Image (tube, rainbow, N blue to C red):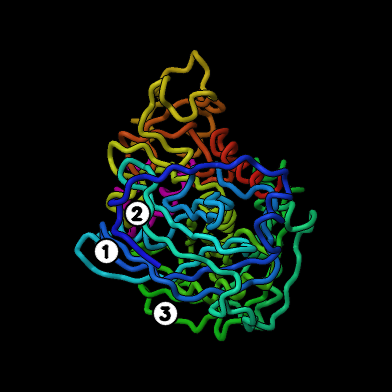
Amino acid sequence: MTKSGLFVLAVVSIAFAAPLCAQDAFTASFMDETLRFDIVHTGTKGAEQISLDKLCTEGAWPGSLTGLIDSLNLGEYQCRLIDAEKDRLIYSRGFSTIFNEWQTTDEAAHGAQRAFHESVRFPLPLKKARLELYRRNKHMEFGKIFTTVIDPASVDIIRDTKMPNVPVTQILHSGAPHEKVDIVLLGDGYTKKDMKKFFADARHYTDQLFSTQPFRSRKNDFNIWAVSVPSDESGIDQPDKNIWKRTALGTSYNTFGSARYVLTMNNDAVRQYAALAPYDFVIVLVNTPRYGGGGIFQLYATCFTGGETRETAWHSDYVFVHEFGHCFGGLGDEYYTSDVPYTDFLPAGVEPWEPNVAAIADREHLKWRDLVSASTPLPTPWQKAVFDSLTAAPRSFQKNAADYNEKRRAAADALSQFLDRHPLNNIVGAFEGAGYKSNGLYRPAVNCRMFSKSLIDFDPVCSRAINRMIDLYSK
């Protein structure tokens, strides 16, 4: 097993062998079993190290038997499994990590060292295979940072993992796991007495996902599972309020100093409970009405359940679908007016890998240029100054004033009307303001579920990315 420093190896191109017929490619290379490769990911800004923690099996392989090679080019990292004897790529997936997000925070920039537990999952190979992990350099090209050999006969593979004994319920059944996108819903901060609420929440947010396009049109391509994860106490950690809870998954607000960012560092617990069902993607519902959530590509999404008032009850519906857009489609945030904990999440002058955020907006190079009409100017003027003034107005309101809530509602209504009545709705262009930056980054549409706090559908570029991911797992 070897490792290397970040961005120092030459970019490795993938050599594809002549493809085998559909399912034959799987049976020629893999057992119908899942192998989980757990690592400890350590480092600071600009440096990282990957070390093996353990290898364990997780039951039958739930993924596609035909979508083995990832052609979508998404994610900060990529996992590649190579037949050691034939030197042939047999499996690949892009993904992102909490570690790479943390590297863009001030804490990392000041030289702090941190460690994160992570997992890479793939079908168990029939014979020895070389596992290679790649990361993008500043030019967005993949360079190898880790390699090891996977021996399916190794005694180091844990094959008798003790699984939690809790109920699993299928919320939506559309077909065999190999032919569908399988999502597992976990709960954190639900006690045994809260399980009725958990299953009601699971059904509610499943309905919300499939009320949104393009998921609504592709509902038959999904299976949804719910695992009743019991916690000792209701609710989750809120460090900024000195609230601490004993929960099964360890989710918490204030991740990286952002009050609303909800993640967990207890990767092993998440994986153990998720493996009780066949899963491709994980969503964690947290039993709290406080606004918050999170989503990392190919890791998991989190979402609070409900609103603190009747007026804000729909906010969690928005968050659930928005965060799953990150986790599932690799979609970037299109907004730019909210505070985030990152200092250089999307570096200036670099074309992001996210399919819905662009740094280059000319007609020849825009990444979604095929969806733009010849009559649409690029970049696309969109009354940005008006939008900016509407979003800036609430910052001048006095929070202790008697009319504060009334003013906030009026400002929110004005912003909603601006977006709902915008003359360029339903037009694909390059609208400046995206990826947490007011200038220099562009999004495909005036409005989208990745842009505004609303129940709007995904824009055409985001929808295409989502549909491509569905195809990868279901065809």
**Residue placed farthest to the bottom in the image?**
232
Is residue 374 inside the magenta stretch?
Answer: no
Residue closest to the eye, 281 or 286: 281
Residue lying at 60% horizontally and 69% vertically, measured from the top left: 152
Q: Is residue 389 above or below residue 69?
A: above
Element at badge 2? loop
Element marked by disc 3: loop
Check disc 1 and report its element: helix, strand or loop: strand
User: Could you tell me residue 130's position as x and y percent?
Assistant: 50, 60
Name the residue nearer the viewer: 35 or 401.
Answer: 35
Span of residues in magenta: 391-413
Q: Main secondary structure of the magenta part?
A: helix
Q: CA distance from mark 2 to mark 3?
A: 22 Å
Q: Amino acid at mark 3?
A: Ile
Q: Which residue is mark 3?
A: 243
Q: Position of residue 422 (x, y in %)?
A: 50, 28
Please report contact status of discs 1 and 2: CB closer than 8 Å, yes or no.
Answer: no
Give the side of residue 192 with respect to residue 290, left or right.
Answer: right
In the picture, which quadrant includes the C terminus?
top right
Badge 2: how crowded within 10 Å, few (<14), some, or many (20+)? some
Point 28% across, 39% down: residue: 348
Whether the residues at callouts 3 and 1 have beta carbons within 8 Å, the answer is no
